[in-house]
Amino acid sequence: MDSSSPTRSLIEQISSVDLPTTNGSLQPHVRQQLQSLVKKLSFALESPFETLNRLVVLPFQHAVVRVAIDLGLFGYMVEAGETGRTEDEIKSKTGVDAILLPRLLRTLAAIGLLRQLDEQHWVATDLTNVCTNPTIVCGLKFMSDFIGPVFQQLPSSLAKRNYRCPTATQGPLQDAYDTKLAGWEYILDPKFSDLLENCNTFMKGRREGSISWLDFYPFAENVLADAAADPEAVLVVDVGGGLGHGLVEINEKFSQRKGRLILQDHPKTIEQAGIGAGVFELMAHDFFKSQPVHGPKIFLIRQVLHDWPDQECQRILEHLAAAMSPGYSKVLINEFVVADVEASDFITAIDLVMMGMSGGMERTKSQWSNLLASAGLRIEKIWTLDDETESVIEAVLDASSITYGNGKDAMAIKS
């Protein structure tokens, strides 16, 4: 390996990374930088055959993790602490036969989810503990049980449609489940109630475990500073806001704020939201129909638009634009902005999940700009913390897209 080789260059780049910490932990952007470099180094060190092997075994490893969840194996191993368990103990607990068990355990150890102490003795790792987290468990179940069959259909589904992007109602999900419904409509079928609960738990936990958009978006300066002082005025409408955790967070961080908070979502979701925790109002609403709330300071829409293709997103945004007050209202979109160069494997994977689920997508800055422009909106500014945290896109009415009618304050958006 000579001094000009890519491998040596990557090693030198890793060695030269500054390592600032916060509360004893690497700062997020440094950790992501190191992860990216280490991943590139790992790829550079692989032979072509090793790369092929890595790709081939991924589905089988995921399947074994799913089996381990069904067996309650991870929790059982974590309970044992540093002493671990023997194969006989694990066999007695799980009922797995003596030939199958070590094959499963070896696979889990190969991906770091267990550690083998000797021929008959196994112990939990830090990653084993992670696999007992309800958010992780529910996410793995949802991806395996509902999304898994969709991606088995992906090659044939794209081929038979001449490699055109799937739509909300024509794609691998429809092929997998023989339905004409969009994915987010199909999963509301009562037969998928457990999977929907897994999905909601995963999304809720992922939001709670990640950095909040309110930690880096200047909400006080950009929203509260010129918001109406009337307590009856609407401050925030959370469009497709799930169970309302976003509004609860706003209320907790800005308890002195004035103005109403309104949660909008599908009627079945609104039923689960209870009474709004005494913080926000509940409103069942289909965001593909006219927006009933006019002139709020903020229409907040978080992790919703990536569920849908551009055509459907344009309809959603046009309804919001038509209900905005020029010079006052804003749309805040909390979603990923895909890097134009070297997008992360996490973002690219989520993009494919959205595509398979409902023809949706993660978008680049230019794609966001074009989408918003199609609905009469323009980007004011984008706040991005790092590549793997959802950005905040602040959008306002595009003055060139507004026309006024004959009536007082009558307004329309040019189509």
Image (tube, rainbow, N blue to C red):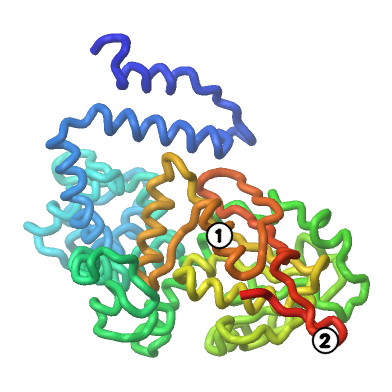
Of 123 and 152, which appears nearest the observer? 152
The location of residue 243, given as percent across then percent down, is 60, 76
Distance in Å between CA atoms under marks 2 and 1: 30 Å
- The answer to whether the residues at label 2 and label 1 have Cβ atoms under 8 Å apart is no
Q: Please name the amino acid that badge 1 sits on.
A: Asn
The location of residue 235, given as percent across then percent down, is 80, 72
Q: Residue at x 62, y 69 (%)?
A: 301
Q: Residues within 10 Å of mark 1 (few under 14, many from 20)?
A: some
Q: Circle 1 sits on which residue?
A: 370
Q: Please name the amino acid that badge 2 sits on.
A: Asn
Foreground label between 2 and 1:
2
Q: Splitting the image into 4 quarters, where does residue 126 fall?
A: top left
Q: Is residue 30 above or below residue 326?
A: above
Q: Residue at x 89, y 71 (%)?
A: 228
Residue reaching furthest top?
3
Q: Is residue 335 left or right of residue 134?
A: right
Q: Earlier in the sequence, mark 2 or mark 1?
A: 1
The location of residue 175, given as percent across then percent down, is 24, 77
Q: Residues within 10 Å of mark 2 (few under 14, many from 20)?
A: few
Q: Is residue 76 above or below residue 70?
A: above
Q: Say if residue 247 shows up in the picture.
A: no
Q: Circle 2 sits on which residue?
A: 406
Q: Is residue 173 above or below residue 386?
A: below
The C terminus is located in which quarter? bottom right
Q: Residue at x 39, y 52 (%)?
A: 348
Of 75 and 359, which appears nearest the observer? 359
Q: Which mark is residue 57?
A: none
Of 277 and 415, which appears nearest the observer? 415
The location of residue 157, given as percent across then percent down, is 22, 70
Q: Residue at x 55, y 85 (%)?
A: 266
